[in-house]
Amino acid sequence: MERLKVLVVDDESRMRKLVKDFLTKSGYDVLEAGDGEQAVDTFFKEKDIALVVLDVMMPKMDGWQVCKEIRAFSQVPIIMLTARTDEQDELTGFKLGVDEYIAKPFSPKILVARIEAILRRSGQGNSDDTLEYAGIIIDKVAHQVTIDGQPIELSYKEFELLTYFMENKGIALSREKILNSVWNYDYFGDARTIDTHVKKLRSKMGEKGNIIKTVWGMGYKLEE
Amino acid sequence: MERLKVLVVDDESRMRKLVKDFLTKSGYDVLEAGDGEQAVDTFFKEKDIALVVLDVMMPKMDGWQVCKEIRAFSQVPIIMLTARTDEQDELTGFKLGVDEYIAKPFSPKILVARIEAILRRSGQGNSDDTLEYAGIIIDKVAHQVTIDGQPIELSYKEFELLTYFMENKGIALSREKILNSVWNYDYFGDARTIDTHVKKLRSKMGEKGNIIKTVWGMGYKLEE
DNA sequence: CACTTTTATGTAGAAATTGTGAAAATTACT
DNA sequence: AGTAATTTTCACAATTTCTACATAAAAGTG
């Protein structure tokens, strides 16, 4: 299991160090940024930051601005730190999609607790863990599929199979290939078991089922 | 190897810059346009744009309109960005021939992934899995043939046969040779079965069918 | 032009492949 | 262990593709 990355943005290096120590001890990988621009740069250079802790008051680019820039591309959870308990700020923050709002000074313990709560809640809401096409949404983390908003129940294999199709839409997949990818490499059974699974998948998918096309003499593919 | 050109259209320059940075890093040549009119101008001035990333909401001319104008002349893949998750929008988009639909905010990583998937699918990706000649495109991976942009349905043997012709265009192929290449070596049936397949191929290819010439007393060839 | 050879085409039956439902085997859950 | 759910196998039906064949059309030959 990989450690989750947290980006800590504050212009005071002492502050960053304190937070970093606590988070590192709690099992996170911590990246630092000393100002807003640096924060945005780091965020988009590193591609899998799980959460951002963001101070409001900073030189060059303040926290609100950083938040906006990040939100234009990402739903990553953001925790805002502010010295003031100004209510107006808090409102602005929620409008921008800030997930939590912690007033300085705060205890590092609380910060860690909040971070863990948020990550648990969002299921480490990495949007790369979802596949979407033609009204079919696959949530790999929750192991859940919805079609046009309606959740459908799939068995493990069915889920794996549909995921494989979605990850390779438009590509004709031979039974051999499917077996090697979805089944374990040590499977030596009948390839026709795929047919059966495709049949069940199609029927469970209702009228969307016909998106899985038969490529005669070859295998199957998910239509584009 | 030449870099593929991607046109990014958005009225926010900050947004364009971020997308551009990512795409440039991923090996694409990025052109920018700040509004719809500029987008259309740029698209038709540059003649080999491989893909367009298009924001819906823009001044002067919105994304749908730009899409229409481009589609009137070109089948270039289009990715639409929209802030709204309005389903109606999505429907309109697909009717206009939008290839992908990404809701803002999104992660640049996803955008790049989608772009690469689309280019790979449309065969423009840097792969030798596609054959192209005279408006006929064979996508070996998808096991799919398009003629002047229109996909046509071929059976397994027909697909193999056309692929063989395309790989040997301009070369007169004896029935013997064709049998040995397209059919299994243990085939001992009538060589005249090729005639039947050629007939079906020609008819399925419509007026492009006559590109397969008869070499009297010898076999067939794909005209060069 | 008559004649031979070769190719084109339509059709029907053969062969191959996939769809389907049910039963058997395996796995997961109390 | 007992039960339910899932996965796999299997047999046969349905479908698609392939091939053979008969006849028509076209091309070459003298």
Image: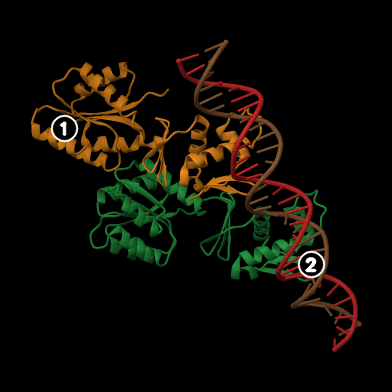
Chain colours: A orange, B green, C red, D brown
In-front residue for pair D1/B195: D1
Q: Is residue B26 visible?
A: no
Q: Residue at x 8, y 31 (%)?
A: A86
Nearer-the-camera pick, B206 or B116: B206
- Are both tags, 1 and 2, on one chain? no
Disc 2 chain ID: B
Q: Amino acid at mark 2?
A: Met
Q: Residue at x 55, y 46 (%)?
A: A221
Q: Quadrant of residue B131?
A: bottom right
**Could you tell me how far apart the alpha carbons at marks 1 and 2 are, in whole angstroms?**
81 Å
Relative to residue B22, is residue B163 drawn left or right? Answer: right
Q: Which mark is residue A156?
A: none
Mark 1 neighbour class, 10 Å CA radius: few under 14, some 14 to 19, many 20 or more: many
Q: Dot 2: within a 10 Å radius of its alpha carbon, few (fewer than 14), some, or many (20 or more) residues?
A: few
Q: Position of residue B171 (x, y in %)?
A: 71, 64
* Residue that badge 1 annotates: A56
Q: Which residue is mark 2?
A: B218
